[in-house]
């Protein structure tokens, strides 16, 4: 556990940005990856022990992590920003794509949605963090813009490559096509909680959609 930084004051916390002075310190001092990791792991541990996001304050997180509040505020403007990094830490990264087969790259991307769905079903911590982030429209919008939209752009890039290479028809609505590939898996992963998320599902979805959008030979 990381030792508290000298000179920090663990005083009463409201969970909000302490002011412009701390913001300036946050911008001016290099971050320690070790402290970042210790804080995020502390939040996950507290959630695993049954705490809710509402239970957590910057003061409690700092005390449990063994760092001062000032150390947290140099890294995050408040609890909401910290929770975004906690969510990113447990959210699976998009897979590296080979860039050779459009079909294989689409399978890899759709299967990532399947694995995220399994993780959400099996992880109470992930569900708690998602609910907490989703309850704050401003924070959710930031997560959607920086994470979810980035995943979607990755899929659309693969589809554009398929059109350019002649593997896919060029008369299709690219945005709608992206929904056709991701929608069935998202429905099973997020809405139909009892539906199977078996291995091979991504291949079946991709092959079914591709049958209708491949360029005729």
Image (cartoon, helix red, strand yellow):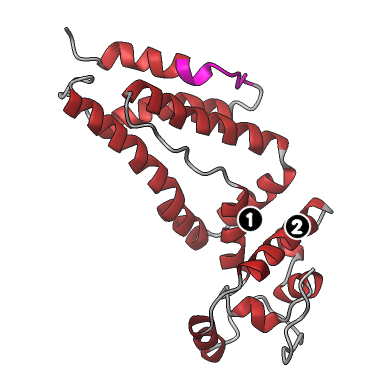
The residue sitting at 46% across, 24% down in the picture is 184
Residue 212: give x, y in percent of width and height.
29, 13
Q: Main secondary structure of the magenta part?
A: loop
Residue under label 1? 132
Q: Is residue 89 above or below residue 169?
A: below
Q: Considering the numbered disc 2 on the image, is that residue within a helix, a strand or a loop?
A: loop
In the picture, the quarter occupied by the C terminus is top left
In percent of the image, x 69 and y 79: which residue is there? Answer: 14
C-alpha gap between disc 2 and disc 1 = 9 Å
Toward the right, the furthest residue is 49
Q: In the rendered structure, are the residues bearing label 2 and label 1 in contact, judged by CB atoms less than 8 Å apart? A: yes
Residue 16 appears in the figure: no
Q: For numbered disc 1, what is the local secondary structure?
A: helix
The segment highlighted magenta reads: 195-203
- Dot label at residue 151: none
**Residue 62 within the magenta-colored segment of the rendering:** no
Q: Is residue 164 left or right of residue 104?
A: left
């Amino acid at each position: 556990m990381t030792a508290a930084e000298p000179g920090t004051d663990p005083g009463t916390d409201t969970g909000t940005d302490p002011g412009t002075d701390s913001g300036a310190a946050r911008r001016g001092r290099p971050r320690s990856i070790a402290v970042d990791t210790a804080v995020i792991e502390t939040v996950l541990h507290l959630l695993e022990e049954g705490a809710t996001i509402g239970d957590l304050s910057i003061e409690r997180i700092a005390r449990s992590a063994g760092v001062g509040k000032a150390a947290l505020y140099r890294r995050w403007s408040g609890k909401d920003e910290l929770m975004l990094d906690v969510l990113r830490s447990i959210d699976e990264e998009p897979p590296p794509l080979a860039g050779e087969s459009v079909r294989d790259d689409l399978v890899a991307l759709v299967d990532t949605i399947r694995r995220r769905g399994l993780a959400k079903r099996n992880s109470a911590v992930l569900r708690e963090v998602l609910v907490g982030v989703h309850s704050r429209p401003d924070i959710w919008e930031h997560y959607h813009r920086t994470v979810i939209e980035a995943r979607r752009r990755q899929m659309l890039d693969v589809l554009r490559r398929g059109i350019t290479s002649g593997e896919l028809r060029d008369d299709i609505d690219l945005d709608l096509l992206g929904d056709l590939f991701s929608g069935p898996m998202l429905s099973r992963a997020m809405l139909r909680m009892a539906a199977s998320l078996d291995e091979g599902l991504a291949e079946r979805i991709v092959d079914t959609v591709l049958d209708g959008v491949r360029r005729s030979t």
